[in-house]
Image (tube, grey):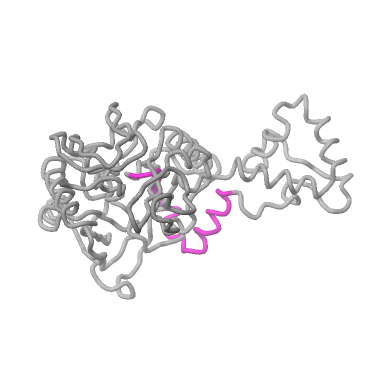
Amino acid sequence: MLEKNAVLVESALKEYYFNRFDVVHVPVRASEREFGYQKINGGMIRHLAIKNNKELHLLLMKEIPSDVYCSNAYYSFPNLPMAEKDWKGADLIFDIDAKDLALPCRKDHTVSKCTSCQNVGTGEQGKCSLCGSTKFESASVICSNCISESKKEVKKLIDILTSDLAIKKEEIDVYFSGNEGFHIRVTNNAYETLGSQQRADLVDYIMFNGVIPETFGIRKQNNAKILLPTTDERGWRGRMAQNLFTTKAKTSRLTKQIISEGYQSFQLRLEEIRQSMGVKVDPKVTMDIHRIFRLEGSINSKSGLSKIQCSNLDSFDPFSEACLLGEDEIKIISNCPLSIKLKNKKYGPYNNETVTLPKYAAVYLICKGLGNAL
Protein backbone atom coordinates (compact mmCIF):
# COMPACT_ATOMS: atom_id res chain seq x y z
CA MET A 1 0.00 0.00 0.00
CA LEU A 2 1.25 3.50 -0.86
CA GLU A 3 2.61 5.37 2.14
CA LYS A 4 -0.01 8.13 2.00
CA ASN A 5 -2.74 5.47 1.88
CA ALA A 6 -1.17 3.61 4.79
CA VAL A 7 -1.13 6.78 6.90
CA LEU A 8 -4.82 7.46 6.24
CA VAL A 9 -5.93 3.87 6.88
CA GLU A 10 -3.81 3.53 10.02
CA SER A 11 -5.33 6.73 11.40
CA ALA A 12 -8.82 5.32 10.80
CA LEU A 13 -7.86 2.04 12.49
CA LYS A 14 -6.41 3.82 15.52
CA GLU A 15 -9.61 5.80 15.94
CA TYR A 16 -11.69 2.64 15.55
CA TYR A 17 -9.80 0.59 18.11
CA PHE A 18 -9.91 3.49 20.56
CA ASN A 19 -13.64 4.21 20.18
CA ARG A 20 -15.11 0.78 19.38
CA PHE A 21 -13.35 -1.62 21.67
CA ASP A 22 -16.80 -2.70 22.82
CA VAL A 23 -17.03 -4.89 19.70
CA VAL A 24 -13.45 -6.24 19.91
CA HIS A 25 -12.83 -8.75 22.67
CA VAL A 26 -10.95 -11.94 23.43
CA PRO A 27 -12.84 -15.23 22.94
CA VAL A 28 -13.45 -17.82 25.64
CA ARG A 29 -10.34 -19.57 27.01
CA ALA A 30 -8.24 -16.67 25.71
CA SER A 31 -5.20 -17.61 27.82
CA GLU A 32 -4.96 -20.93 25.94
CA ARG A 33 -5.06 -19.41 22.45
CA GLU A 34 -2.36 -18.05 20.17
CA PHE A 35 -2.81 -14.49 18.91
CA GLY A 36 -1.22 -12.77 15.94
CA TYR A 37 -1.44 -9.62 13.86
CA GLN A 38 -0.23 -7.83 10.76
CA LYS A 39 0.58 -4.20 10.23
CA ILE A 40 0.06 -2.34 6.95
CA ASN A 41 2.84 -3.34 4.54
CA GLY A 42 4.26 -5.62 7.26
CA GLY A 43 4.59 -9.34 7.81
CA MET A 44 2.73 -11.62 10.21
CA ILE A 45 3.56 -11.49 13.92
CA ARG A 46 2.25 -14.55 15.76
CA HIS A 47 2.85 -16.86 18.75
CA LEU A 48 1.55 -14.20 21.12
CA ALA A 49 -0.26 -14.92 24.39
CA ILE A 50 -3.03 -12.52 25.45
CA LYS A 51 -4.94 -13.28 28.62
CA ASN A 52 -7.75 -10.74 28.67
CA ASN A 53 -9.42 -7.75 27.03
CA LYS A 54 -7.12 -5.27 28.74
CA GLU A 55 -4.01 -6.86 27.22
CA LEU A 56 -5.71 -7.01 23.82
CA HIS A 57 -6.68 -3.35 24.01
CA LEU A 58 -3.10 -2.36 24.85
CA LEU A 59 -1.80 -4.34 21.86
CA LEU A 60 -4.28 -2.72 19.49
CA MET A 61 -3.48 0.83 20.63
CA LYS A 62 0.27 0.27 20.60
CA GLU A 63 0.66 -1.60 17.29
CA ILE A 64 -2.44 -0.39 15.36
CA PRO A 65 -2.58 -3.64 13.35
CA SER A 66 -4.28 -3.86 9.98
CA ASP A 67 -5.49 -7.38 10.81
CA VAL A 68 -5.79 -9.28 14.11
CA TYR A 69 -6.00 -13.04 14.50
CA CYS A 70 -6.64 -15.64 17.18
CA SER A 71 -6.21 -19.41 17.03
CA ASN A 72 -9.11 -21.80 16.98
CA ALA A 73 -6.75 -24.15 18.83
CA TYR A 74 -6.08 -24.40 22.56
CA TYR A 75 -2.52 -24.82 23.82
CA SER A 76 -0.74 -25.27 27.13
CA PHE A 77 1.89 -22.75 26.00
CA PRO A 78 0.44 -20.58 23.21
CA ASN A 79 3.42 -18.19 23.06
CA LEU A 80 6.01 -20.90 22.36
CA PRO A 81 7.07 -22.16 18.89
CA MET A 82 4.55 -24.52 17.29
CA ALA A 83 6.42 -27.71 18.19
CA GLU A 84 6.43 -26.72 21.87
CA LYS A 85 2.90 -25.35 22.29
CA ASP A 86 1.32 -28.65 23.43
CA TRP A 87 -1.89 -28.76 21.36
CA LYS A 88 -4.95 -29.58 23.48
CA GLY A 89 -7.77 -29.26 20.93
CA ALA A 90 -9.42 -26.76 18.62
CA ASP A 91 -12.80 -25.28 17.81
CA LEU A 92 -14.36 -26.50 14.58
CA ILE A 93 -14.28 -23.62 12.08
CA PHE A 94 -15.64 -23.05 8.57
CA ASP A 95 -15.11 -20.35 5.96
CA ILE A 96 -17.77 -19.63 3.33
CA ASP A 97 -16.60 -17.09 0.79
CA ALA A 98 -18.59 -15.60 -2.10
CA LYS A 99 -15.61 -15.97 -4.43
CA ASP A 100 -15.91 -19.78 -4.15
CA LEU A 101 -19.57 -19.89 -5.19
CA ALA A 102 -19.00 -19.26 -8.93
CA LEU A 103 -21.83 -16.73 -9.03
CA PRO A 104 -22.62 -15.16 -12.43
CA CYS A 105 -22.95 -11.71 -10.83
CA ARG A 106 -19.28 -11.70 -9.89
CA LYS A 107 -18.12 -10.57 -13.32
CA ASP A 108 -20.35 -7.49 -13.00
CA HIS A 109 -18.67 -6.24 -9.84
CA THR A 110 -15.07 -7.27 -10.43
CA VAL A 111 -12.65 -4.47 -11.31
CA SER A 112 -9.42 -5.10 -13.20
CA LYS A 113 -6.58 -2.61 -12.81
CA CYS A 114 -3.65 -2.51 -15.21
CA THR A 115 -0.45 -2.73 -13.17
CA SER A 116 1.43 -0.67 -15.78
CA CYS A 117 -0.77 2.41 -16.24
CA GLN A 118 -3.44 1.92 -13.51
CA ASN A 119 -6.28 1.97 -16.05
CA VAL A 120 -9.36 0.25 -14.63
CA GLY A 121 -12.27 -1.62 -16.16
CA THR A 122 -14.99 -4.03 -15.11
CA GLY A 123 -14.77 -7.78 -15.55
CA GLU A 124 -11.71 -9.72 -16.64
CA GLN A 125 -9.43 -7.90 -19.06
CA GLY A 126 -7.21 -9.62 -21.60
CA LYS A 127 -5.28 -6.50 -22.65
CA CYS A 128 -5.24 -2.95 -21.34
CA SER A 129 -7.11 -0.61 -23.69
CA LEU A 130 -4.63 2.22 -23.00
CA CYS A 131 -1.15 0.70 -22.86
CA GLY A 132 -1.66 -2.85 -24.15
CA SER A 133 -0.31 -4.53 -21.02
CA THR A 134 -1.65 -7.97 -20.11
CA LYS A 135 -0.84 -7.70 -16.40
CA PHE A 136 -3.78 -6.87 -14.15
CA GLU A 137 -4.77 -6.79 -10.52
CA SER A 138 -8.40 -7.51 -9.70
CA ALA A 139 -10.67 -6.34 -6.91
CA SER A 140 -14.18 -7.48 -6.14
CA VAL A 141 -16.88 -5.22 -4.74
CA ILE A 142 -19.43 -7.73 -3.48
CA CYS A 143 -23.12 -7.23 -4.05
CA SER A 144 -26.28 -8.12 -2.16
CA ASN A 145 -26.67 -11.27 -4.27
CA CYS A 146 -23.23 -12.49 -3.12
CA ILE A 147 -24.30 -12.02 0.48
CA SER A 148 -27.68 -13.67 -0.09
CA GLU A 149 -26.14 -16.74 -1.74
CA SER A 150 -23.46 -16.98 0.96
CA LYS A 151 -26.19 -16.92 3.61
CA LYS A 152 -27.84 -19.89 1.88
CA GLU A 153 -24.60 -21.86 2.22
CA VAL A 154 -24.40 -20.93 5.92
CA LYS A 155 -27.94 -22.21 6.47
CA LYS A 156 -27.15 -25.46 4.66
CA LEU A 157 -24.10 -25.89 6.88
CA ILE A 158 -26.04 -25.22 10.08
CA ASP A 159 -28.69 -27.74 9.02
CA ILE A 160 -26.06 -30.47 8.58
CA LEU A 161 -24.25 -29.58 11.81
CA THR A 162 -27.44 -29.72 13.87
CA SER A 163 -29.30 -32.55 12.08
CA ASP A 164 -26.46 -34.93 11.26
CA LEU A 165 -23.72 -34.13 13.79
CA ALA A 166 -25.83 -33.45 16.91
CA ILE A 167 -24.35 -29.99 17.39
CA LYS A 168 -26.64 -27.58 19.22
CA LYS A 169 -27.48 -24.24 17.63
CA GLU A 170 -26.18 -22.40 20.69
CA GLU A 171 -22.77 -24.01 20.04
CA ILE A 172 -22.60 -22.39 16.59
CA ASP A 173 -21.47 -18.78 16.10
CA VAL A 174 -21.82 -17.09 12.71
CA TYR A 175 -19.75 -14.04 11.76
CA PHE A 176 -19.51 -11.84 8.71
CA SER A 177 -15.84 -12.13 7.74
CA GLY A 178 -15.40 -8.43 7.04
CA ASN A 179 -15.01 -8.92 3.32
CA GLU A 180 -16.76 -11.46 1.09
CA GLY A 181 -18.33 -14.12 3.24
CA PHE A 182 -18.94 -15.71 6.61
CA HIS A 183 -16.99 -17.51 9.31
CA ILE A 184 -18.66 -20.22 11.39
CA ARG A 185 -17.23 -21.43 14.69
CA VAL A 186 -18.40 -24.51 16.61
CA THR A 187 -17.50 -24.97 20.26
CA ASN A 188 -18.42 -28.56 21.09
CA ASN A 189 -16.29 -30.89 23.20
CA ALA A 190 -17.11 -33.91 21.04
CA TYR A 191 -15.32 -32.37 18.03
CA GLU A 192 -12.62 -30.40 19.83
CA THR A 193 -9.94 -33.11 19.70
CA LEU A 194 -10.45 -34.11 16.05
CA GLY A 195 -7.19 -34.18 14.11
CA SER A 196 -6.58 -32.68 10.69
CA GLN A 197 -7.49 -35.84 8.74
CA GLN A 198 -10.69 -36.35 10.72
CA ARG A 199 -11.69 -32.77 9.99
CA ALA A 200 -10.92 -33.35 6.33
CA ASP A 201 -13.28 -36.35 6.37
CA LEU A 202 -15.92 -34.18 8.04
CA VAL A 203 -15.54 -31.54 5.32
CA ASP A 204 -15.96 -34.21 2.64
CA TYR A 205 -19.23 -35.22 4.28
CA ILE A 206 -20.45 -31.63 4.50
CA MET A 207 -19.46 -30.88 0.90
CA PHE A 208 -20.98 -34.19 -0.27
CA ASN A 209 -17.64 -35.14 -1.82
CA GLY A 210 -16.80 -38.60 -3.09
CA VAL A 211 -20.42 -39.65 -3.29
CA ILE A 212 -21.08 -42.83 -5.27
CA PRO A 213 -24.34 -44.44 -6.50
CA GLU A 214 -23.83 -47.46 -4.22
CA THR A 215 -24.41 -45.21 -1.19
CA PHE A 216 -27.98 -44.76 -2.42
CA GLY A 217 -28.69 -48.33 -3.46
CA ILE A 218 -27.67 -48.16 -7.13
CA ARG A 219 -25.17 -50.80 -8.25
CA LYS A 220 -23.63 -51.60 -11.60
CA GLN A 221 -25.23 -55.02 -11.44
CA ASN A 222 -28.44 -56.42 -9.93
CA ASN A 223 -30.25 -53.11 -10.16
CA ALA A 224 -33.54 -54.95 -9.89
CA LYS A 225 -32.87 -55.37 -6.17
CA ILE A 226 -32.00 -51.76 -5.43
CA LEU A 227 -33.21 -50.07 -2.28
CA LEU A 228 -33.36 -46.32 -2.86
CA PRO A 229 -33.41 -43.99 0.15
CA THR A 230 -36.68 -42.75 1.58
CA THR A 231 -37.63 -39.21 2.53
CA ASP A 232 -37.88 -40.04 6.23
CA GLU A 233 -34.24 -41.18 6.51
CA ARG A 234 -31.68 -38.98 8.22
CA GLY A 235 -28.49 -37.63 6.73
CA TRP A 236 -27.62 -37.49 3.06
CA ARG A 237 -29.82 -40.46 2.12
CA GLY A 238 -32.88 -38.58 3.36
CA ARG A 239 -31.79 -35.35 1.67
CA MET A 240 -31.17 -37.22 -1.56
CA ALA A 241 -34.63 -38.83 -1.41
CA GLN A 242 -36.25 -35.44 -0.86
CA ASN A 243 -34.38 -34.10 -3.87
CA LEU A 244 -35.23 -37.07 -6.08
CA PHE A 245 -38.85 -37.67 -5.17
CA THR A 246 -40.12 -34.37 -3.62
CA THR A 247 -43.36 -36.19 -2.65
CA LYS A 248 -44.19 -39.79 -1.71
CA ALA A 249 -46.72 -39.92 -4.54
CA LYS A 250 -43.93 -39.63 -7.09
CA THR A 251 -41.65 -42.22 -5.48
CA SER A 252 -42.82 -45.32 -7.36
CA ARG A 253 -42.79 -43.73 -10.81
CA LEU A 254 -39.42 -42.02 -10.31
CA THR A 255 -37.86 -45.16 -8.85
CA LYS A 256 -38.73 -47.06 -12.03
CA GLN A 257 -37.32 -44.23 -14.11
CA ILE A 258 -34.04 -44.20 -12.14
CA ILE A 259 -33.69 -47.98 -12.54
CA SER A 260 -34.34 -47.83 -16.27
CA GLU A 261 -31.83 -45.02 -16.82
CA GLY A 262 -29.05 -47.07 -15.24
CA TYR A 263 -25.92 -46.61 -13.16
CA GLN A 264 -24.07 -44.02 -15.26
CA SER A 265 -27.09 -41.76 -15.53
CA PHE A 266 -27.60 -41.84 -11.76
CA GLN A 267 -23.91 -41.06 -11.25
CA LEU A 268 -24.26 -37.92 -13.36
CA ARG A 269 -27.40 -36.96 -11.46
CA LEU A 270 -25.50 -37.38 -8.18
CA GLU A 271 -22.81 -34.96 -9.34
CA GLU A 272 -25.44 -32.36 -10.26
CA ILE A 273 -27.07 -32.76 -6.86
CA ARG A 274 -23.69 -32.52 -5.12
CA GLN A 275 -23.10 -29.16 -6.75
CA SER A 276 -26.39 -27.79 -5.44
CA MET A 277 -26.76 -29.56 -2.09
CA GLY A 278 -23.16 -29.83 -0.87
CA VAL A 279 -22.00 -26.90 1.25
CA LYS A 280 -19.29 -24.82 -0.40
CA VAL A 281 -16.80 -24.34 2.43
CA ASP A 282 -13.05 -23.80 2.15
CA PRO A 283 -11.68 -27.22 3.20
CA LYS A 284 -8.20 -25.90 4.00
CA VAL A 285 -9.57 -23.67 6.75
CA THR A 286 -11.40 -26.46 8.58
CA MET A 287 -8.53 -28.94 8.25
CA ASP A 288 -5.94 -26.58 9.74
CA ILE A 289 -5.84 -27.29 13.48
CA HIS A 290 -3.20 -24.59 14.05
CA ARG A 291 -4.85 -21.81 12.05
CA ILE A 292 -5.11 -18.31 13.45
CA PHE A 293 -8.53 -16.97 12.52
CA ARG A 294 -9.58 -13.33 12.13
CA LEU A 295 -10.59 -11.95 15.53
CA GLU A 296 -14.22 -10.98 16.07
CA GLY A 297 -14.71 -7.21 15.98
CA SER A 298 -11.42 -6.51 14.21
CA ILE A 299 -11.13 -4.70 10.89
CA ASN A 300 -10.51 -6.63 7.68
CA SER A 301 -7.81 -4.75 5.75
CA LYS A 302 -9.20 -6.00 2.43
CA SER A 303 -12.28 -3.82 2.89
CA GLY A 304 -12.17 -1.67 6.02
CA LEU A 305 -15.26 -3.52 7.27
CA SER A 306 -15.48 -5.32 10.62
CA LYS A 307 -15.71 -9.01 11.32
CA ILE A 308 -18.94 -9.01 13.29
CA GLN A 309 -21.29 -11.61 14.73
CA CYS A 310 -24.62 -12.19 13.00
CA SER A 311 -27.27 -12.53 15.68
CA ASN A 312 -29.97 -12.70 12.99
CA LEU A 313 -28.56 -14.06 9.74
CA ASP A 314 -31.69 -13.37 7.69
CA SER A 315 -31.79 -9.65 8.43
CA PHE A 316 -28.04 -9.08 8.70
CA ASP A 317 -26.77 -6.37 6.33
CA PRO A 318 -22.95 -6.22 6.23
CA PHE A 319 -22.94 -3.03 4.17
CA SER A 320 -24.47 -1.28 7.15
CA GLU A 321 -23.87 -3.32 10.30
CA ALA A 322 -20.20 -4.09 9.59
CA CYS A 323 -19.43 -0.56 8.37
CA LEU A 324 -18.14 0.85 11.67
CA LEU A 325 -15.34 3.27 10.80
CA GLY A 326 -15.75 7.00 11.35
CA GLU A 327 -17.96 9.32 9.30
CA ASP A 328 -15.85 12.48 9.14
CA GLU A 329 -15.24 13.51 5.53
CA ILE A 330 -11.99 12.87 3.67
CA LYS A 331 -10.84 13.83 0.19
CA ILE A 332 -9.37 11.08 -1.96
CA ILE A 333 -8.80 10.41 -5.65
CA SER A 334 -10.97 7.51 -6.77
CA ASN A 335 -10.92 5.50 -9.96
CA CYS A 336 -13.83 3.14 -9.44
CA PRO A 337 -16.02 2.22 -12.44
CA LEU A 338 -18.69 0.73 -10.17
CA SER A 339 -21.10 2.17 -7.65
CA ILE A 340 -20.90 0.86 -4.10
CA LYS A 341 -23.49 1.01 -1.35
CA LEU A 342 -22.49 1.53 2.27
CA LYS A 343 -24.80 2.58 5.10
CA ASN A 344 -27.68 2.87 2.61
CA LYS A 345 -25.80 5.46 0.53
CA LYS A 346 -24.41 5.00 -2.96
CA TYR A 347 -20.92 6.11 -3.92
CA GLY A 348 -19.50 6.18 -7.42
CA PRO A 349 -18.79 5.40 -10.11
CA TYR A 350 -15.75 7.68 -10.14
CA ASN A 351 -13.48 8.34 -13.08
CA ASN A 352 -10.10 9.18 -11.58
CA GLU A 353 -11.60 12.16 -9.77
CA THR A 354 -11.20 13.93 -6.45
CA VAL A 355 -14.16 13.19 -4.19
CA THR A 356 -15.10 13.97 -0.60
CA LEU A 357 -16.35 10.88 1.21
CA PRO A 358 -17.09 9.67 4.73
CA LYS A 359 -14.06 7.96 6.22
CA TYR A 360 -15.66 4.49 6.03
CA ALA A 361 -16.26 4.86 2.26
CA ALA A 362 -12.83 6.37 1.60
CA VAL A 363 -11.07 3.55 3.45
CA TYR A 364 -13.19 0.94 1.65
CA LEU A 365 -12.11 2.25 -1.76
CA ILE A 366 -8.47 2.53 -0.70
CA CYS A 367 -8.46 -1.03 0.69
CA LYS A 368 -9.97 -2.27 -2.56
CA GLY A 369 -7.25 -0.49 -4.54
CA LEU A 370 -9.79 1.87 -6.10
CA GLY A 371 -8.76 5.08 -4.38
CA ASN A 372 -5.71 7.00 -3.16
CA ALA A 373 -5.25 9.51 -0.38
CA LEU A 374 -4.31 13.04 -1.35
* Residue that extends furthest to the top in the rendered view of this protein: 249
Task: Please tell me whether residue 206 belongs to the stretch shown in magenta.
Answer: yes
Residue depicted at x 77% and y 41%: 228
Q: Quadrant of the N terminus?
A: bottom left
Which quarter of the figure has residue 86?
Answer: bottom left
* Residue 276 drawn above or below residue 43: above
Residue depicted at x 38% and y 54%: 114
User: Residue 326 appears at what percent x and percent y?
Assistant: 16, 37
Left or right, 364 with reference to 153? left
User: Residue 5 appears at what percent x and percent y?
Assistant: 19, 51
Left or right, 188 with reference to 28? right
* Residue 109 drawn above or below residue 75: above
Camera-side residue: 84 or 335?
335
Which quarter of the figure has residue 362?
Answer: top left
Camera-side residue: 276 or 289?
276
Left or right, 158 with reference to 349? right
Task: Please tell me whether residue 143 belongs to the stretch shown in magenta.
Answer: no
User: Residue 316 appears at what percent x and percent y?
Assistant: 36, 31
Number of marks present in the image shown: 0
What segment carries the magenta color?
Answer: 179-207
Residue depicted at x 43% and y 56%: 132
